[in-house]
Image: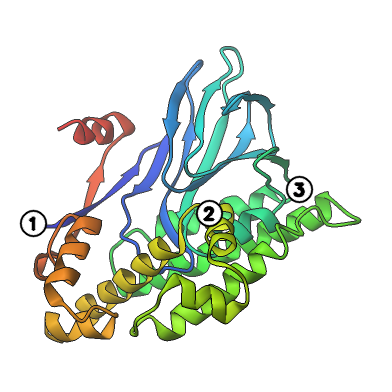
Amino acid sequence: MEFEVGFTNSVRYKCLEDLQRRSVDLYLSYCGMEDVECGHHFGPHVRTEYVIHLVTKGKGTFRCEDSHYEIGENMAFLIYPGMDTEYEADNECPWSYAWIGFNGAKAHACVTNAGFMPENPVITLQNMDALLECIQHILEAHQLTYANELRRSSELMRFFSTLIEDCGVSNPGPSRNSYDYPCAVYVEQAIDYMQKNYAHKIKVNDLADYIGINRSYLTNSFRKILNMSPQKFLINLRLDKALSLLRETMLPINTISVQVGYTDPLAFSKMFKQQYGVSPTAFRDAPEKLVEYENKNEYMRSLSI
C-alpha cells in the first residue's frame, strides 16, 4: 500500500489534499483556491479539523449550527471541528475563495487570537494579499520532499502570524481574544507536562494533581479548548512521536513502542492501527505518492472509487 496526496492545478481550482500529519502542535491538512460556480453548495457537513475560508471576491452564505451569515469580499469564515456547517455561493455574484485546513494543540489558540469565536466565526480582513500569498506558496511546495514539508509548515506559521496581526489592525482597543483564561493556561501546563513525560506512565488524576485542579475541570478544559479529552491528546501525542520514529529511524517496533510510552508492543500496534488504519510495520514500508489531477471533477471522481 501507499499514502496518496492529491494535487490539482487548474485555472479555476487549485488544491493540495490529504497531507499526512507531522506534528501534534499545529499541522496542515489541506489548502486550495477556487473560482466557484453560481449557486455552488457544500454541506451539511461536520469537519474533523479547522478550516478557514478567505473570500477574495463575490458573495455567499454560511451556516454554522443554527446561525446564518452573509459573507462578502475580504471576509473570512471559520469552520470548527465537530460543528455542523454548510455554505453556498450567490446565484448572481458567486464568490471566489481560498481555504486552509489544519489542526493540533495550538490550533484553538491560533484561531482565537485571530479574532474568531464559536458564537461569531466570521471576521473582516485588511491584509488579504499576504494571506493568499502564504497559501499560494504552500501549493507551490506540493512535491513530497522534506524541504517542501518544512516550507509548508513555515508558511502555515506565517499565515497565522499575519492573520493575528491583521486582527489587531481590524479590532483596535481591548482584545477580544483573551480566550477562556484560565482554562487555556491549565491546558497548556498539561500539554507541556505530557510533551516532556509521554514516554512514562501518565494518569489524568496525577496530571490534574500536578497542575492543582481536579480531574473533571481538567477534562472539561481540554474539551473546551481542544475538542478532545486529555487521554485522547496523550494518545495523539504518543502516536505522532511514533510516526516520526517510524519514518526517520530504523529502530525496532518494540523499541519505538517503549519510547512512546507503551510497554506492551501488541497494545501499541493495536492502538496505532486503530488510529491510522495500518500497522506500524505497514506504515513504515508504505511510501507517500503525489497524485496530480487535471481538474476538480477528476479529483472528486477519485474519491468515489
Mark 2 lies on residue: 223
* Quadrant housing residue 114: bottom right
Q: Amino acid at mark 2?
A: Arg
Residue type for callout 1 = Met
Compare residues 53 and 43 and report the one nearer the observer: 43
Front label number (2 vs 1): 2
Residue at 83% of width from left, 57% of height from top?
Answer: 175
- The residue beneath circle 3 is 126
Please provide percent x and percent y for residue 90.
Answer: 58, 17
Q: Return the mark for residue 1.
A: 1
Q: In the rendered structure, which disc, 2 or 3, sits on the residue that comes first in sequence?
A: 3
Task: Return the x and y of residue 68 as percentages of the image width and height.
Answer: 65, 23
Quarter location, residue 209: bottom right
Do callouts 3 and 1 mark residues in contact (Cβ within 8 Å)? Answer: no
Q: Element at badge 3?
A: loop
Callouts 2 and 3 close, C-beta under 8 Å: no
Task: Classify mark 2: helix, strand or loop.
Answer: helix
Q: Residues within 10 Å of mark 1 (few under 14, many from 20)?
A: few
Inspect this view and state whether residue 22 appears.
no
Q: Residue at x 46, y 67 (%)?
A: 153
Number of the front mark, 2 or 3: 2
